[in-house]
Image (cartoon, rainbow, N blue to C red):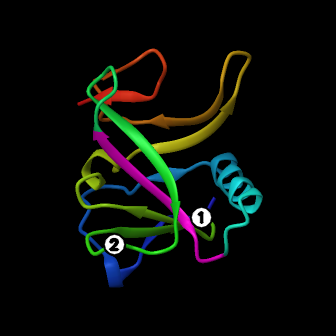
Amino acid sequence: MSEAHAHADHAVPIDGPPIALTEVAVERFRSVMQQEKLGADYGVRLAVSSGGCSGMSYSMSFENQARADDTVLEQDGLKLFIDGESAPYLQGVTIDYVVGLHKEGFKFVNPKATRTCGCGESFGV
């Protein structure tokens, strides 16, 4: 797995290691992007917002342009867009894609989370 790199033209300082995706997560994002017929200029916007049963929740969407306060990372050729407010909450996070008997989907492993909900969709710090 290659390391994530910040693009200097839209860099917002992040202290500590940036977000990381497992190989399985990268392949799943690529698969969905191909199904949606999204071009090579698209990437994944990762964000954190208030809400969810533990106080904060993760969101993901596809986008093809960085915003003014974004950090743009690239991992294995996949662009990641992270806004300035979400960046501190996402630093050090690993995103995986898991398949289990009861659930299939992206899993956020956040070392800063002091609590998470049973569904795994929200967290608190």
The stretch of residues the image draws in magenta is 40-49
**Residue at position x 34%, y 26% in the image:** 52
Q: Residue 102: horizontal and vertical position, in percent? A: 68, 16
**Residue at position x 33%, y 44% in the image:** 48
Name the kind of residue labelled 2 in the image: Arg
Left or right side of 58 for 54: left
Q: Residues within 10 Å of mark 2 (few under 14, many from 20)?
A: few
Position above or below: 120 against 108 = above
Quadrant of the rendering where the N terminus is positioned: bottom right
Position above or below: 98 against 94 = above
Residue occupied by mark 2: 67
Can you tell which quarter of the image residue 98 is in?
top right
Left or right side of 35 for 85: left
CA separation, marks 1 and 2?
25 Å
Which residue of the protein is positioned furthest toward the front in this rendering?
36
Q: Residue 26: horizontal and vertical position, in percent? A: 64, 54
**Residue at position x 39%, y 18% in the image:** 117
Position above or below: 103 against 64 = above
Magenta span main SS: strand
Quadrant of the rendering where the C terminus is positioned: top left
Which residue of the protein is positioned furthest toward the bottom in this rendering?
9
Q: Residues within 10 Å of mark 1 (few under 14, many from 20)?
A: few
Q: Secondary structure at mark 1?
A: loop
Residue occupied by mark 1: 2
- Foreground mark, 1 or 2, reads 2
Q: Secondary structure at mark 2?
A: loop
Q: Nearer the viewer, residue 69 or 89?
A: 69
